[in-house]
Amino acid sequence: MGCVVVGEWATGLEESAPFGFQGETEMKCILCGGETHDGEVVVTLNRGETVAIIKGVPAQVCENCGEYFLSKEANAVVPGRADEAVAKGAEVEILRFAA
């Protein structure tokens, strides 16, 4: 399973079309055309001096290239969890996903 470093996160990420799928259980990868399947990924987000690592995030994962696509629900949770790490002044925060 792949891990993607997203870089700076922003509020409203859940509205970002390339990062979400609309609830399909299977879809074609937009990068390579491979089949996707249900899986879990590690999402790493950076803001300033904080690195937030969120493990076990549900996603559709491409079986060919490893690219992943988060649901709108996961996209709504992930940035908030990372923002909590910044608010605490954490340098590195490792979290488990919980919707």
Image: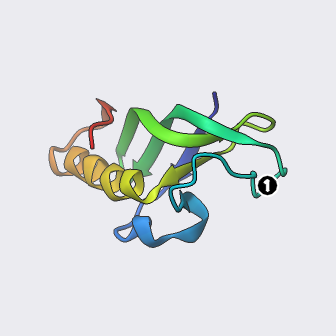
x 15%, y 44%: residue:
88
Quarter of the image with the N terminus is: top right
Q: Is residue 82 left or right of residue 10?
A: left
- Residue 53: name its quadrant: top left
Q: Nearer the viewer, residue 12 or 49?
A: 12
As drawn, the residue found furthest toward the left would be: 88
Q: Name the spot of residue 96 as percent of width and height, x first.
A: 31, 30
SS class of the residue under badge 1?
A: loop
Name above or below for residue 95 compared with residue 34.
Answer: above
x 31%, y 52%: residue:
77
Name above or below for residue 80 compared with residue 63.
Answer: below
x 44%, y 72%: residue:
15
Q: Residues within 10 Å of mark 1 (few under 14, many from 20)?
A: few
- Residue 34: name its quadrant: top right
Name above or below for residue 50 compared with residue 76.
Answer: above
Q: Which residue is mark 1?
A: 31
Q: Name the spot of residue 71 as percent of width and height, x first.
A: 47, 54
Q: Name the spot of residue 2 as percent of width and height, x first.
A: 64, 32
Q: Is residue 72 left or right of residue 90?
A: right
Q: Name the spot of residue 6 as percent of width and height, x first.
A: 54, 51
Q: Is the image coloured rainbow, by chain, by secondary structure, or in one colour?
A: rainbow
Q: Nearer the viewer, residue 2 or 32?
A: 32
Q: Nearer the viewer, residue 30 or 85?
A: 30
x 84%, y 50%: residue:
32
Quarter of the image with the C terminus is: top left
Name above or below for residue 15 compared with residue 78.
Answer: below
**Image label count:** 1
Q: Is residue 68 left or right of residue 9?
A: right
Q: Amino acid at mark 1?
A: Leu
